[in-house]
Structures are given as structure tokens and as C-alpha cells.
Amino acid sequence: MNRKITVVGNWKMHGSKSHVSEFFAALGAHHFKESASIQMESVVCPPFIYLDHAAKLLEQNPKCELGAQDVSAHQAGAFTGQVAATMLAEVGCKYVIVGHSERRQFCQETDDIIAEKFLAAKSAGLTPILCVGETQAQREADLTASVVVGQLQALLAKAGAAAFAQAMIAYEPIWAIGTGLTATPEQAQQVHGLLRLTIAEYDATVAASLPILYGGSVKPNNARTLFSMPDINGALVGGASLNAQDFLAICDAAL
Ligand code: PEP
């Protein structure tokens, strides 16, 4: 086994209890391909309210891992509406997305808050998936490198590169999320390479084993070429992850 590809489905605020049941039934019935050289791991992140239902379905047929779409930076207390990392771990989550561009945009999450969330996730034993990415205007102004590297800095300053052990980064160009526009494999590889190099400047060992996922309109028809790039270790999939057949086709494209 010399490569691992992780496919993470972010359902955002979509779905219903019956959708969860149908989705996991399709997953349970699917025969994942196997390969001697590539390991594929799939992760599904439904809304908080459905995590427990999904966890119970997965107990009977553990075909994928469970993740959450967000986490509180706090351990416990008077934080109405928030969900602690320990609670996510308790219901069976292994992963949590932090710093998704929609939370940066609509919930005013800063790099500092996101770093706190990332560290809260780690202290509860969860694997955080840190999202970074530039807007269309930033790309056109040639600011992609400084934006994505800047988004790592708060965490590097707080916790050093060691924070990225047992963690993941997702490069999600904002202009590609939910738009049908995908970064070309070469554009994505360029940013992934830069992210890995940035971490390597602090710790080459952590950087070498750090999974860096690509997100932004990943579909069954473009996943394979993205996965063929050396620094693309998987995908964070929004829209296509709601449809079990599309999600499974993306998983199968890893092998
Ligand atoms: C996402 O939600 O992170 C995402 C990448 O969405 P989509 O795949 O729909 O672009």
C-alpha cells in the first residue's frame, strides 16, 4: 500500500432523516473496489442533527467514517447552539471540517477562531480538516499563494507544524465551490505543492504524510485526473456527495 485517497462528503445544510437512511443503505450495498497499492477511505459529514442516526446505521455496516461540518472552539459552557468536539467524538465522529469558506463568509470566522476550533478538535481526538482557499478576485490579482499560506499562519503561530500531524488540509478555491468550475489538476497541484512546502519548512516529516484534499465541484467525471496528481490526496465533495451513486463513483475513481 503506497497511497491513500480520502473522499469526504460535505452535505452542508441538506438532507433529511430518510435521506440519511437511503444514502447509507446504498453505501452498505456497494462493493468498493480494492487495490494493492491504493487505500481509499470515505467520510460523510451530514448536518449535526443526523450524526447519531448515521452512526447507528454505520454500526451495522461500517463502510465509511463519520465527520461533522463544524465544531465549537470551546470545551463546554454557555455557548448556545454550539457543539463541543467531545460531543462529536462521543456520537462516533472521527473527522471535523473547520474553516469552510461558507463559515468564514457567513459566520465571520477568522483564522484565529478557526485555529482554536482546529485545536479543540485535536484535543478531543478528532482529525480536523482545515479548509483554505482564495476568491476569484484574489486569484486574478495573483494573491492565491499569499492567501492560502496566510490561512495556515494562525495555526502555525499557535501550535507549530506539529498541529498538522493527524490532521488534513482541504484546498478549496472559493470560485470553484458549488459553481461547476473546477481548478484544473495542474492549478490544484500547484497550490497543494505550495501548502506541503510551507509545512515542510517547519517539519518535513509532518508535511510528507499530511493529506491535502482538493474541493470545488469535484464530480465523478473529474475526480480521477485530480487524484492522479502527486500532492492531491483526496477530495472534499459538496453537491455530488448528496447523491450516493455520485459519491460512490468519486470513491471508486480513487482506485
Ligand atoms: C464544499 O462544500 O466544500 C464543496 C467543495 O462543494 P462542491 O463540491 O459542491 O463545489
Image (cartoon, rainbow, N blue to C red):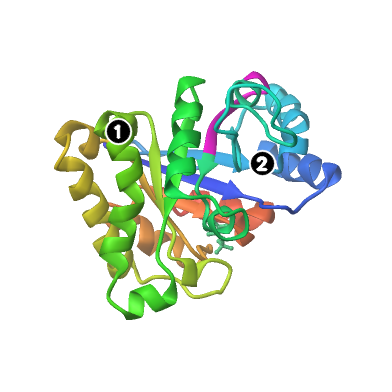
Q: Quadrant of residue 86?
A: top right
Q: Describe residue 161's horizontal placement relative to residue 24 as left or right.
A: left
> Does 46 appear above or below 164?
below
Dot 1 amino acid type? Met
Q: Amino acid at mark 2?
A: Leu
> Residue most toward the bottom?
140
Tell me which residue sits at (39%, 34%) in the image.
167
The quadrant holding residue 189 is bottom left
Q: Which residue is at the front of the view, 249 or 139?
A: 139
Q: Which residues are magenta?
A: 90-96
- Residue with the mark numbered 1: 1
Q: Is residue 37 visible?
A: no
Q: Where's ligand 1: which quadrant?
A: bottom right
Quadrant in which the N terminus is drawn:
top left
Residue 97's spot in the image, x, y percent?
53, 42
Residue under the point 37% across and 73% down: 138
